[in-house]
Amino acid sequence: MTRHVIVSAVCGLALGALLTRAASTPGSADGGRALFERRCSGCHALDHEKSGPRLAGVFERRAGSVAGFSYSDALRSSNLIWNAKNLDRWLADPEQVAPGNDMAFRLENAEERAKIIGYLREAASKLRGSEAP
Ligand code: HEC
């Protein structure tokens, strides 16, 4: 019994390490769409504004640049470009990236972040109807 618990704990650690590594190289969008729906769609859609800005085309877009969306000054003046690394940092802890921003949400699960970022990358290029990133 005790041994079983220890083994599970060790497995958990190993899995954690794997997931952390996965986050730095965003993987496929497998399941990313469903995760986006579950985690983000309360505030975001791809093609229109909700309480958060539209996210189609967010890849390689400058932060705070959807015309007509009322961003926080913090995000608008952050000068970030939304590449995979910045998106991962933002989703993990928006407050670290742009202190005083308006996105009251964070996603601690690195695997989920990687999948959602993969989905956004694909969705962005499809909706733009242009070259793959
Ligand atoms: C509780 C509502 C809420 C949830 C949930 C939420 N967001 Fe946001 N998001 C916002 C708001 C509001 C902003 C604008 C922040 C600002 O202006 O400071 C924002 C901004 C962003 C931006 C910056 C966009 C730009 O044009 O610069 C990205 C990227 C983003 N969110 C991604 C996500 C993703 C991906 C998820 C799901 C994992 C998510 N958000 C979940 C409310 C939310």
Image (cartoon, rainbow, N blue to C red):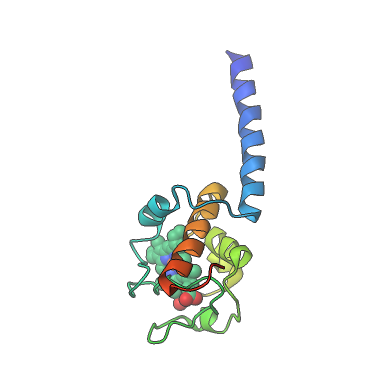
- Dividing the image into four quarters, tell me where ligand 1 lies: bottom left
Q: Nearer the viewer, residue 19 or 99?
A: 19
Residue 75 position within the rendered picture, expressed as x and y whole percent measured from the top left:
52, 78
Residue 90 in view: yes
Q: Position of residue 84 (x, y in %)?
A: 60, 63
Whether residue 21 sits left or right of residue 45 in the image: it is: right
Query: Which residue is at the front of the view, 10 or 130?
Result: 130
Where is residue 78? Give x, y as percent: 59, 80
Q: Height in image: 126 above or below 2? A: below
Which residue does the image show at 48% across and 56% down from the upper left? 116
Q: Is residue 103 visible?
A: no
The number of numbered discs placed on residues in the rendered structure image is 0
Q: Quadrant of residue 88?
A: bottom right
Outermost residue on the top side: it is: 1
The quadrant of the image that shows the N terminus is top right
Residue plotted at (52% across, 83% down): 76
Residue at image point 48% right, 74% down: 130
The quarter of the picture where the C terminus appears is bottom right
Q: Position of residue 48 (x, y in %)?
A: 33, 74
Reply above or below: 60 against 17. Answer: below
Q: What residue is drawn where x is 62% and y is 40%?
A: 16
